[in-house]
Amino acid sequence: MNKIKIVSDVLEKLEIDDSIEIEEIPKNEFFDVTTICINIVKDTDLILEYSTRKATKLNVKIKVLKDVRFNLYEYRYGKNFKVQYQYNLLENSDTKIYKFYDVAGIKEMNMIYLLENNAKIDYYFKTISSGCEKYNMTIYHYASNTISNIYNNGINILKGNLTFNISSFVLEDKIDTCVLQNSRIINLTNNKCQIKPNLFIDEYNVEASHSAYIGGFSADDMFYLNSRGINELDALKLLINGFLTKDMPKYLVTRIKRNINKYWR
């Protein structure tokens, strides 16, 4: 398993094979943002871990080459992040991204470019939001037969303020594309949370849908667990666990459960 660890905006640990090419462009007197360029040239898996204790800016560019299958597992913790991602997906590439965050403040921009025919991305994002978190995401279908499935899920707690802005674009004549947005925020506070889903479709031969939910867990689910003798706190932990671990790989499930236990003892 390839692994990259970034502390603040510096590459601290690098364990990669020939399936990955990486370049770090440090910030300098002209540019105040470190850029990390990652090219995925063969089928592979990558663990990406970030942490910081100070305000930091980072620009990450990931390119998945033709016919490559790529799985990314990302874990981020700390505070005061500003980060921009750019994903460039080429012909017949199949990218699966799994992210879990436990951060106290972040502004993040994700730009996903499906550049060539049959490029596909499945994006699963989970967060425990205890501070101000804002995620902007734009997905561009620049070719036919491309697929984007975007799932954003968050638990909002303490002083959390969580926002998802997601916009998907399909250009005219880019046929047989599939566009999905699914966003859910479980808000356990009285703080304001927002989901802003947008679909900009200039072609009829497209499957496109979005769904958005902000609220609590189902009263029926809580009643069912309580009726089985499970107290309120344990029932809440079970529902949170299911919400955050669904569809996630083992590497991230372990970290999700550890963070759930940190907040709900």
Image (cartoon, rainbow, N blue to C red):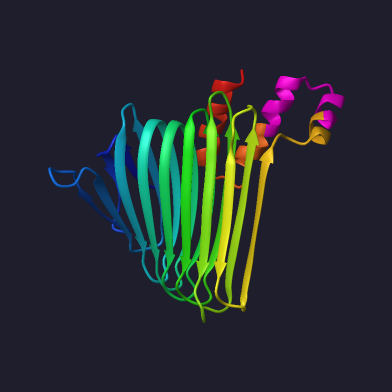
Reply above or below: 185 against 209: above
Name, please, the residue furthest toward the top.
265
Q: Which one is nearer the viewer's eye here, 30 or 255?
A: 30
Residue at point 70%, 30% (across, down): 238
Judged left or right of residue 203, residue 89 is: left
Q: Quadrant of residue 53?
A: top left
Q: Which one is nearer the viewer's eye here, 2 or 185?
A: 185
Picture coordinates of residue 124, whole percent (x, y): 54, 49
Name, please, the residue furthest toward the right.
227
Residue at point 61%, 17% (across, down): 265
Residue at point 48%, 36% (across, down): 133
Range covered by the magenta-colored residues: 223-239
Q: Main secondary structure of the magenta part?
A: helix
Reply above or below: 88 against 79: below
Picture coordinates of residue 222, whole percent (x, y): 79, 30
Reply above or below: 141 against 158: below
Name, please, the residue furthest toward the left.
29
Judged left or right of residue 46, residue 190 is: right
Picture coordinates of residue 135, whole percent (x, y): 47, 45
Judged left or right of residue 72, residue 215 is: right
Judged left or right of residue 17, residue 141 is: right
Is 187 magenta? The answer is: no
Can residue 230 be seen from the camera position used here? yes
